[in-house]
Image (tube, grey):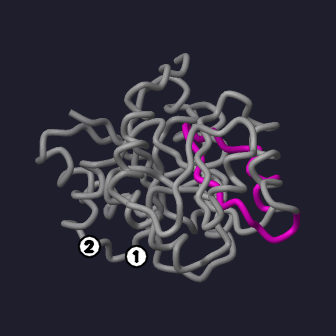
Amino acid sequence: MRNYLLLDDNEAFAENLAEILRDGGDEATVVTDGARALELARSNHFDVLLTDMKMPGMSGAAAVHHIRQVDPGLAAVVITAHPGEDDLETARREGLLAVLPKPVPIPMLVGLLSQARRDGLVALVEDDLALSDNLTEVLRSRGFSCVTARSVLDAEQLASVRPFAALVDLRMPGGPDGEALRRLRARFPELPVFVMTAFPDVASTLPEHRGIFSKPFDTAALLETLERIHAERRPRPS
């Protein structure tokens, strides 16, 4: 049984969604403002936060940020009728499991939630947009959330998130080979980092990575490795 926190100022919509989740045997708590959601996150163990974006007071992006400070392992799903809004990019930088449109496709949502992993955030540092989007989708299908970076500078700005693993391209804009890897290692010294590259001979000379996936790589092997690392991780203090 999973425990969901639903944040939406449209209480009727949230209660209808909560009822669907409860009918499936899970627990769901509905709140209509971010401050109350943050209060509950301090005293309860939730598996997934589902939040609207546009709300009076605290926005959905702000709610994800503040709640993640309390519970870094919480998976987060944004449901919004405004997919182009600026705040959504802010929320993405926190590492989301998914962004879904309103009206939400219920079968897709239920399937997504059934796979969602606590402490399942992967930092994906890759400047090839097509590859990054494809990997994000593949990881999501296994319940992993993603936070992405497309340059050395972007990688430097991942300081506020708490990933359990990172996938890093060797050559990234904004620095020499391996610079994004070095900065991630400096920020997260205990983080398992895997290098993705078409230049494995160069990557083998870099220190402190857990493995190399040579492009084009076997996605199934990558997923198997991440699932093993996730299963072996030390639980975060509650």
Measured as percent of width and height from the top left, residue 195 is found at 61, 52
Q: Residue at x 67, y 44 (%)?
A: 161
Image height of 224 relative to 77, above or below = above
Q: In the current view of this chain or complex, which residue is farthest to the right?
A: 175
Disc 1 is placed on an element classified as strand
Identified at 61% across, 67% down, the residue is 198
Q: Position of residue 226 (x, y in %)?
A: 43, 43
Q: Is residue 59 visible?
A: no
Q: Is residue 31 above or below residue 149?
A: above
18 in the magenta segment = no
Instruction: Examine the rendered structure and indicate whether residue 170 appears above or below residue 113.
Output: below
Which kind of residue does numbered mark 2 sit on?
Pro
Q: Amino acid at mark 1?
A: Pro
Q: Which residue is mark 2?
A: 105
Percent x, y for residue 74?
48, 39
The x and y percentages for residue 221 are: 36, 51
Mark 2: few, some, or many residues within 10 Å (few <14, many ≥20)?
few
Q: Give the left or right position of residue 150, taking residue 32 as reference.
A: right
Marker disc for residue 119: none
Determine contact: label 1, label 2, CB under 8 Å: yes
How many marks can you see?
A: 2
Q: Residue at x 13, y 39 (%)?
A: 25
* Mark drawn on residue 101: 1
Q: Residue 166 colored magenta?
A: yes
- Mark 1 neighbour density, 10 Å: few (under 14) some (14–19) many (20 or more): few
How far apart in space, not on screen, are marks 1 and 2 (Cα)?
A: 8 Å
Asked whether the viewer can see residue 104, the reply is yes
Q: Give the residue displayed 59% in from the left and 36% down from the top.
A: 192
Quadrant of the rendered image containing residue 169: bottom right
Residue extent of the magenta highlight = 154-175
The residue nearer to you, when weighing 34 against 87, is: 87
Callout 2 secondary element:
loop
